[in-house]
Image (cartoon, coloured by chain):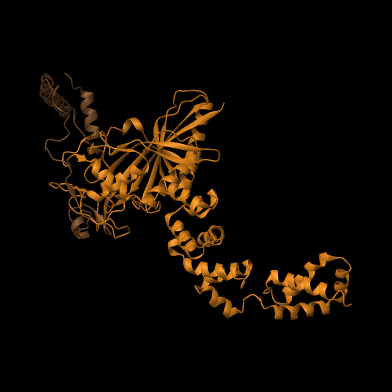
Amino acid sequence: MEYESIIGLEVHAQLLTESKIFCGCSTIFGSPPNTQTCPVCLGLPGVLPVINRKAVEHGIKTVLAVGGKVHAESIFARKNYFYPDLPKGYQISQYEKPLSTGGFIEIDTDSVKKKIKINRIHLEEDAGKSMHPDDESDDETSVDMNRCGIPLIEIVSEPDIASPEEAYLYLTKLRQILQYLGICSGNMEEGALRCDANVSVRPMGVEKFGINTEVKNMNSFRGVEKALSYEIERQIEILEKGGTVVKETLLWDEKKQISSVMRTKEESHDYRYFPEPDLVTLAVSEEWIDQIKRSLPELPEQKKQRFVTQYEIPEYDAGVLTSSKELADYYEECVKYHPESKMVSNWVMGEVLRELKERKIGIKNFKIAPTDLTDLLRLIDEGIISGKMAKEIFAEMTETGKSASEIISEKGLAQITDEEELSRIVEEVLTDNPENVKMYRAGKEKLLGFFVGQVMKRTEGKANPKLVNEVLKAKLSENRDEK
Amino acid sequence: MAITLKDVEYVAELANLELSQKEKFKFQKELDNIIKYIDQLNELNTENVPVTSHVIPLENVFREDRALPSLSQDQALANAPQKKDGFFKVPKVIG
């Protein structure tokens, strides 16, 4: 039987603020354990949370970027559960009246553009970090509360995602938007972006949804894709055998590439939400929304379209170049100095991205500044070096950090563009190969390639190919009449 | 009685409480009285009363995004029954 899968994603994004959502503790990542806490985020008695205005603004920015509706009034709620990294015994979140509803993210699948609708976006606080012992003999868990109270938004999608590939595309696009907005680092290794999935399958043509499971603990975008594929196959296998899927929460194990049951839903999902009495209503006025709207940066899709029209590059190029804001900025800076936009695009997408991938670094940490690259490209245009030589020089630049002209003069790499010098070399080649000259003149013009090769050999590839061709052709025909 | 023994057991489990049989009966009675007391509200006509999530007529109390000094690690861990290497230590939990 044919099955289709239905996926909804819940993404938690840490907001880039200086201080936590309800207290003044720093949000810097990687500090020694329990050095960024205070009575508020440790949940000591008698304290009052006060919300961080910037966290709210970051949330509103996201809502506007995905075309959602910011609610004029929203309230906070307590989500009650016990866990050692949740010192208050409840998480301050939003439940009945979230920050927003609606909106969508458009993804480019192989065949079509598809809108994945957003159900809601709400604000909440992060919990602390529990470190479980790897060692079986160790029976204690260590808890670091530094992360308690870091501001988060939770972005809940509608079950519009039809495959693990679409989930991957959705996450990539969402991260891109958050990074463009400058409100989330998008760094999955640091846990700045986390994702849970609700998955169900149903036979093709059946309208009723199947029983869904929740998959947690997916630590990378590829991990999400793999975990979802695994879960979909698992559910289909159960149905094929005539069984029923159990509504439960599963943990993905990246190392073993399997998921295992964490808990069945019945026993744990009674969070007893109720309005947070320590926080007052959050009211977002039209003026505030307008003000934030005006401050929104150019978003990925807009930038991509602008690149297509302004620089007249293919949509594919524009998509790659705008995949991150930093890369797009790099490209634009290059084009400023070297307006041959397609040539620059080829170099950035080819050499630059290859280099970044090999070194596993981002464009921010790339040694070669835009003007260094455009200096190199200009040398090609001026015929001082060939495209092939440029690639070698580029590799050398990334190794040593030296400029293109430095490398060229150090290594004597400049192309021979001096016609007199080339003529001399061409003469030498012709004199040394009288037989071939004769055959060429007898009509075997294919031998031109042989002569070019000989010239290149003698010049160690430094001769300007175009000029070599011209000089050779001239020499081979000018002498014909004399002899 | 509106509150059953089962309700008491369920609420106790959510609250991580272990109750003796005697306590269960005691709380069943007490909780039932509390619910009955609250139920009096149902006798009121609330048709023209707006839904309220908060009793204080205030909105938008914000703080600006500025990092302030935190407690030291020693202070943060001062009341912890168990600690090690700067961490709170708790019995092993999985998942």
Compared across the picture, whether A14 is left or right of A452 comes to: left
Q: Is residue A85 visible?
A: no
Residue closer to the observer: A331 or A471: A471
Q: Is residue B25 visible?
A: yes
Residue at the front extreme of this rendering: A481
Q: In the image, residue A191 lies at what x, y percent?
A: 37, 51
Q: In the image, residue A143 lies at what x, y percent?
A: 29, 51
Q: In the image, residue A50 lies at what x, y percent?
A: 18, 47
Q: Locate the N terminus of chain A by quadrant.
A: top right
Residue at point 51%, 30% (across, down): A4
Q: In the image, residue A346 lies at what x, y percent?
A: 56, 58
Residue at point 16%, 38% (across, down): A277
Residue closer to the observer: B2 or B52: B52
A455 up-or-down from A330: above or below: below
Q: Which chain is orange?
A: A
A390 up-or-down from A225: above or below: below
Q: Colour of chain B?
A: brown
Residue closer to the observer: A392 or A315: A315
Residue at point 30%, 44% (across, down): A60
Q: Locate the C terminus of chain A by quadrant.
A: bottom right
